[in-house]
Amino acid sequence: MTGPGLFARPPEEIAPGAVHVPDWLDPARQRALVESCRDWARGPAGLREVRLPGGGLMTVRQFGLGWHWFPYGYARTAVDGDGQPVKAMPPELAALGRRAVSAAYGDQAPPEEPEKYDIALVNYYDADAHMGLHKDRDERSAAPVVSLSLGDTCVFRFGNTETRTKPYTDVELHSGDLFVFGGPSRFAYHGVPRTLRGTAPPELGLEGRLNITLRVSGL
């Protein structure tokens, strides 16, 4: 699943267990996923603003498939949205998660988890949205997290497991890029300090950035 480019960007291990695979989704697959996200984002249990326990709103809007994430847990209904049942996890996304782990780790791929990828969290970033440094720790599984980028390029900040401060590495994630983190990096802090407006491939017809994050719930 590689896309064309004037200069090839090779895969890179950012930290132990954290691998960036550029251009993993080809243009046709990117377009198909954008169209699917548009369908999935419609209600019921569609795209929503997320209110944090302190009362503030996340600048990123989100919806879930398979399970609904809310701060800080999972439910089968959009408990902090319209209360409707969450849409089922599409089998093609579950399969994509497994293929992504194999693509990132190759022969070093961990043994397949007994559970399948059963969560897709889809985040929409407009030009002003960002995501603070956080850990993905609401799951009961340590299976690798799979992140797929569509649309505008973002600066993805990948840190360490101990603190939100340095050391961290900033990586530009372009449309079609894959990022997988598991093993010793599974519970590393990470976030998106900014997106780069107007950098999406024109053929996607997308303003902003979509991030599809695939996880194993263990629930």
Image: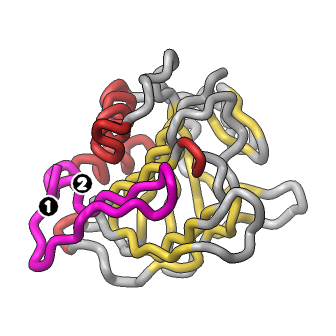
Q: Is residue 94 above or below residue 199?
A: above
Q: In which quadrant of the rendered view does residue 132 lie? A: bottom right
Tell me: 197 left or right of 219: left
Q: Which mark is residue 42?
A: none
**Residue where numbered disc 2 is placed:** 24
Q: Amino acid at mark 2?
A: Trp
On whether residue 5 falls in the magenta region, the answer is yes
Q: In which quadrant of the rendered view does residue 142 lie? A: top right
Q: Residue at x 72, y 39 (%)?
A: 138
On whether residue 189 falls in the magenta region, the answer is no
- Which of disc 1 and disc 2 is earlier in sequence? 1
Tell me: 156 left or right of 12: right
Q: Position of residue 37 (x, y in %)?
A: 38, 48
Instruction: Please tell me whether mark 2 sits on a helix, a strand or a loop.
Output: loop
Q: Residue at x 47, y 54 (%)?
A: 18
**Residue where numbered disc 1 is placed:** 3
Residue that sits furthest to the top in the current view: 114
Q: Residue at x 47, y 40 (%)?
A: 214
Q: Position of residue 43 (x, y in %)?
A: 52, 41
CB atoms at circles 2 and 1 under 8 Å apart?
yes
Q: Position of residue 122 (x, y in %)?
A: 49, 49
For the stretch drawn in magenta, the main secondary structure is: loop
